[in-house]
Amino acid sequence: MDIQDKDLQSIQEVRILVKKAKKAQKEFANFSTQLIDEIVKQLSIAAMAEAENLGKLAVEETGFGIWQDKMTKNIVASQKLYEHIKDMKTIGIISEDKDRKIVEIGTPVGVIAALIPSTNPTSTVIYKTLIALKSGNAIIFSPHPSALKCILKTVKVLKEAAVRMGAPEGLISCISIPTMEGTNELMKHEDVSMILATGGTAMVKAAYSSGTPALGVGPGNVPAYIERSADVKKAVSKILASKTFDNGTVCASEQAIVTEKCISDYVKNELRKQGGYFLTGEEIDKVVRIMETPNGGMNPRIVGKSAKDIAAMAGITIPEGTKVLICEEKGVGKEYPFSKEKLTQLLAFYTVEDWTEGCELCYKLLENGGMGHTLAIHSNNEEVIRQFALKKPVSRLLVNTPSTQGAIGLSTGLTPALTLGCGAVGGSATSDNVGPEHLINIRRMAYEVDDLGITPKENKIIDKLDIDAICKMVIEELKNVKK
């Protein structure tokens, strides 16, 4: 039966969920850190047990990606994340500086609204739940409508595990009637303390303009630079491993390869050997027609699809075993389709004279929709690597590693995360991989370390609010310090 007045029912559902979450969070905030940590551990175990089933369900419902890779992301969001955060101090006294006499106390922010994309639905729910509860918060999910079933199932798994451990009802919940009106109500509700927004640019902008503190992430248009000193065979292998991971649905996946003229032919040949197919002539036109919408945006029909699927949609023939379709692009901008973000198995290819020109081209690609996000470099020249790190407006510079796996903390020591901050340059409030430490307020207890030479007699001056006398006293004290 069709739901009548779906928008109104969604708004009402949100109000009920927020009321329950607020009550549950107040109770949860009084739990011992030991019990909270044990609950988080059990959530991780429960999510791990369902990692495969949830991965399959996500692909079945959305049509995006590869279930084995979604299972891997579920494992990153549960087991690997838990190992990273299990000993982290987030609530109560988290640090004490005896020299400066400052004690830092972590307190939960309250109720968190979590916006979930269709590209990484189950893993993002697991990840956000663990970091929210580790920091003493309640969490309410706003699911992408096309991934509602798998998101609700993931929430159910986590919620049941938490309740079994004694967590209050309402601590973890999800909108079951997703609408724009319901999401807006959630983001703007006075009892929601923070928004964790993962998704498209419009969603993130809506979160930041809601009036509620928000942590959102921008799009990724990740260049991968192969410098002349690189091990080309390994570099190509890692780029393809990243770009084919879940069919390119992670925003940190490579969108363009940039390499130097002196090794360009070698790189191309290696790409062909390992499953890359270079589009030519009419093939490029046919692919462009199905990769973009009339207004120049990314066609959602190609998101998370294999090279074989895209070729079939475009009506072109490609060799069996092709992993990625590649186009030698001539420029950067809206008139060059392959220079944009492509959350699928499509790559742009550029050739430059040297690393300085490559540095400039990578900057242009980042300006074309990836500022603040991620850049990958394959090189054995530490000086070139450092120059890229110093000059590129990114939050993650990944060296000799697959960009997808490196950015989410699977192949690097970065915080395991599925919300990757892009910093102010990318329109984000943080440049970090978001973790529990971003979901707390820190109260600082500071003891006096310098009485400023104030004597009991001079305290009488303060009591009389004699501002001129105080200023003179401070000036004299500063003179004595200089002497």
Image: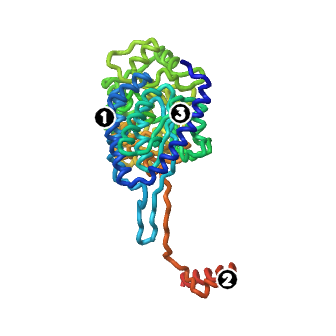
Whether residue 100 is situated above or below residue 464 in the rendered picture = above
Q: Amino acid at mark 1?
A: Ala
Q: Amino acid at mark 2?
A: Ala
For label 3, count other residues whose C-alpha is less than 10 Å away and answer few (under 14), some (14-19) or many (20+): few
Can you say which quadrant of the picture contains the N terminus? top right
Mark closer to the chain start, 1 or 2 = 1
Query: Which residue was labeled with disc 3?
Result: 200
Q: Nearer the viewer, mark 1 or mark 2?
A: 1
Query: Which residue was labeled with disc 1?
Result: 49
Can you say which quadrant of the picture contains the C terminus? bottom right
The residue that appears at 55% across and 83% down in the rendered structure is: 453
Residue 206: horizontal and vertical position, in percent? Answer: 60, 37
Q: Amino acid at mark 3?
A: Gly
Residue 344: horizontal and vertical position, in percent? Answer: 43, 26
- Asked whether residue 378 appears in the rendered view, the answer is no
Colouring of the image: rainbow
Q: Residue 469: which numbered mark, if any?
A: 2
